[in-house]
Image: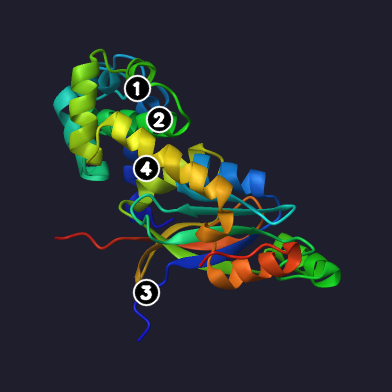
Amino acid sequence: MITKANHFAIFVLDQNSAYDFYVNKLGFKVNTDAVMGPKGRWLTVNPPNQPDLEITLMAIDDKMMFNGESAEIMRDLVRKKTFGFAVFECDDMLATYEELKAKGVKFIKEPTKEFYGFNAVFEDDSGNWFSLGEAKKDQ
Amino acid sequence: MPAETLPKLDLYRRIVQAKLFIDDNFAEPIDAGDIADEACYSKFHFIRTFKTIYGRTPHQHLTHVRVEKAKEMLELGTSVTDTCFAVGFDSLGSFTRLFKSRVGFTPSEYQRQQIERKEQIRQEPLRFIPGCFAMQVSNNSGSKPSN
């Protein structure tokens, strides 16, 4: 029986830039920053309240999961904003929206109240996009 | 944006700016009344609204930011004393007590654990990479994952 997820990967164009985006703008914590092989870097971050969920900021390089041609195809797809990788949750949508906007995060969709709840969409520094929802509050 | 949310935006902007002010100036002696003035609020209304949005008062948030920054500095190897004063505490005793109550370890215990973990990551990086990925690395580099 599968009990939980502990890792998922986001493919990024530049790990240093992604580090700055996820740590300094989104406020995620660095979990593991390790040398991986001769030229690689295993960089994971986690949302502040989820230390056991490691998000791997995976470089799209000509090694590991990609060969030269597929790496270039993947980079191109990321640049074209093809991938929506995850849904994040915040306690207060408008405050989070205002804070992230003040830090330079680009929103593709501003917050709106939908039948399923408050929702917005932002993108990271590579072009990956994420849905942002608001945690349900006790009435 | 729906019209119903518009009147709240200015309120949110001012509270968020106050929160970002705390985030950027955590090392300074910050008083909630000063921030309330900056945000054009009465102190009482400001603290109540801040807590409604963030779940903690401005002072509790300031303490939270200081402890988080202290953790970062300790992880980088900064001494406990230097960390204490750099993040805005003026007493080593109160810093140590508060840090332990929030983190569960004294600053020096926390620093030792984190530096040990970093050293383990440096010496045996594949131990910290899930097996399927570590296997690809070991296949490419000739090293063996240890888990």
Q: Which residue is mark 1?
A: B80
Residue at the spot x=67%, y=66% of the render? B138
- Image position of B65 (left or right of A103): left
Quadrant into which the N terminus of chain A falls: bottom left
- Mark 1 vs 4, N-terminal side: 4
Q: Which image quadrant is residue A119 in? A: bottom left
Q: Which residue is mark 3?
A: A4
Looking at the rendered structure, the secondary structure element under dot 2 is: helix
Instruction: Report the Cα–Cα distance between label 1 and label 4.
Output: 41 Å
- Mark 2 vs 4, N-terminal side: 4
- Mark 1 vs 2, N-terminal side: 2
Q: Position of residue A10 (x, y in %)?
A: 59, 62
Instruction: Report the Cα–Cα distance between label 4 and label 3.
Output: 37 Å
Residue at the spot x=32%, y=37% of the render? B110
Query: Looking at the rendered structure, which numbered label has been put on residue B9?
Result: 4
- Image position of B102 (left or right of A60): left
- Image position of A42 (left or right of B81): right
